[in-house]
Image (cartoon, coloured by chain):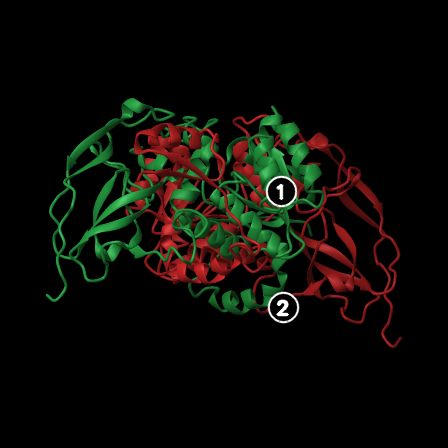
Chain colours: A green, B red
Amino acid sequence: MTHPTTQPPQTTQTEVRLIRRPTGMPQADDFEFVTLAIPDLQADQVLIEATHLSLDPYMRGRMDDAKSYAAAVSLGTRMEGGGVGRVIATTSDKFQVGDTVFGMLGWATHAVLPATTLRRLDPTRAPVTTALGVLGMPGFTGWYGLTELGRPKAGETLVVGAATGPVGSMVGQLAKLQGLRVIGIAGGPDKCALAKDTFGFDDCIDHRAYNSVRDLRHAIAQAAPDGVDIYFENIAGKTLDAILPLMNTHGRIPVCGMVSWYNAGALGATSTTQGPDTLPRLWRTILVSRLSVNGFIISDHWDRYGAFLADVAPKLGHGITYHEDITQGLDQIIPAFQRMLLGQNTGKTIVQVA
Amino acid sequence: MTHPTTQPPQTTQTEVRLIRRPTGMPQADDFEFVTLAIPDLQADQVLIEATHLSLDPYMRGRMDDAKSYAAAVSLGTRMEGGGVGRVIATTSDKFQVGDTVFGMLGWATHAVLPATTLRRLDPTRAPVTTALGVLGMPGFTGWYGLTELGRPKAGETLVVGAATGPVGSMVGQLAKLQGLRVIGIAGGPDKCALAKDTFGFDDCIDHRAYNSVRDLRHAIAQAAPDGVDIYFENIAGKTLDAILPLMNTHGRIPVCGMVSWYNAGALGATSTTQGPDTLPRLWRTILVSRLSVNGFIISDHWDRYGAFLADVAPKLGHGITYHEDITQGLDQIIPAFQRMLLGQNTGKTIVQVA
């Protein structure tokens, strides 16, 4: 090998380990701080001294054992997370000592990582902390969800929660640039001022100022007189409940988080009966399993009826059959309707009149 | 005009009027049967003698006053609905006496309708009642929802409720033709036998045989060992609750109905607090407003990260700004994380380590 192998100039690091699964809000006792040796570098590894660690709501999910889109952090191991740091030793020729990089450093002062998992940052292009926020995973989340799933159109109205956070502020600003009316939801008058004055939101609702869903709904409705076309969901809870009746036909709800439920116990154990926790479980399933849930009304789509007949009519008796449940007499129409609602019919319900 | 104008050979008709909005299951007293004169035909109208009337679950929704995708049936007027009948008089040259047509006849023995709203049926092509079911609105609903929103792929698993109904049996048979494993949900052993023996479903679960959500879930899970990729939703209730944890990543849920809730009061008055009825209200909103709800996890989409940077990085300071909330010291990471979960941070949360 023609490149020098550097080895650590420093021998110890401190990391934060998850040692107990939190109930509700994580507490200090759920973690321990451990000082340990920095291991020798293997081939194509890089030792990074962390300068900035990212904290993100998704980390709360990693502390739980429930099925999610990524494995839980194992007890006794370093908390996961992205961070920015300086390369202080390397056995890879892809990085040099002194480089600034982004990587999954975890909650720690140092990390040894495969070179393939790191991304070099150019501090002259943008402040390196932007790799954790506006130009990192949160900003990318807002951009992708709005662009691909929100499908914004000029003149529409968008609502996004956590308006001053890195996801919400990206969503709101991108939507403003595309000509939408943008309403933020945030906690407290200072954040609402920030959303409007710094991020250029048309309006911002302080959800703490409204105790009831009804009052919160009224405030959002006043800010969104034409209804809501896109609700970018990252908070759920009271805001979701408030906004549902305000959604316009053909509205879109990209679901990327539900932070108001993360500590409320609402996403906890799987219930075996339908109850108040069914909505949080539905919403979480939509997120974790990346479901597409689409309401549709067939009368919107009669332009496709010809395509349907062309496809299906030739299949009658050749792969497609049908079953009819025919009641005789108009005077029997109400009991026939009742039987259908009770599932006592079998097949297509028809009343023969003449 | 060169074509003869025919006038009614018969002078009276009987119709069923909605005279009271039902609470729960519709009762006979919610309707009245009225015999009235058949009006003279205006230009381009057709008088039809009904032979077959369609009964469909959506009609329950039309009896309520709540916001829906179509106006409620006004009290004192004829119940709406599709039907098949014979033309017995016409002032339109588009139809002849003796033609068999499909139209929105309503619950009645006769209807006078504009010629433009009618569709002529060919009784030699398929039995005319198929225009109400397998080749009509219900079959079209199943075809559209499965094809456009379900996006079926060979080898996947589909679950559909009301399996022997005109929507469910269409969905299941189409999915079988496309190589999916198809599980039906139906009420009672006879319907399950019909689903399997006549419609060719791979399996059918009798939801009446399972009292608890847990047991129903277990039965579905046994029939769907690879999980569920498409849940075609037309019943909701206990089945929705049972199936949620069985949904595979990137699953699809086309929502076209929720008949188990139509009479349960679950879709009733809008609550102002979050409670057990929030899920039914969410599900109904998704249907009525034709919402697209899409869960997404940004780590599925890193292939688009370059496109994001190319779009957004040049906008920093030119339409896109950002705000950071930086805490000093790794020893402060847990309180910083707590503050973020409580919304006490402002902007992107970062811990500065070195």
Front position among marks 1 and 2: 1
Q: In the figure, residue A61 lies in which quadrant?
A: top left
Q: In the figure, residue B278 lies in which quadrant?
A: top right
Q: Are marks 1 and 2 in contact (CB under 8 Å)?
A: no
Q: Position of residue B216 (x, y in %)?
A: 37, 35
Q: Is residue A213 visible?
A: yes
Q: Which mark is residue B136?
A: none
**Residue placed most toward the observer, B255 or B312:** B312
Give the spatial CA distance, label 1 vs label 2: 66 Å
Q: Position of residue A142 (x, y in %)?
A: 48, 49
Secondary structure category for the residue under label 1: helix
Q: Residue at x 25, y 26 (%)?
A: A20
On screen, residue B344 versus residue B38, left or right, reads: left
Quarter of the image with the C terminus of chain B is top left
Q: In the figure, residue B5 lies in which quadrant?
A: bottom right
Image vertical order of residue B48 relative to residue B72, above or below? below
**Residue under numbered circle 2:** B122
Image vertical order of residue A293 relative to residue B44, above or below? above
**Residue placed most toward the observer, A133 or B213:** A133
Q: Residue at x 29, y 33 (%)?
A: A65
Q: Residue at x 50, y 43 (%)?
A: B323
Q: Is residue B292 visible?
A: no
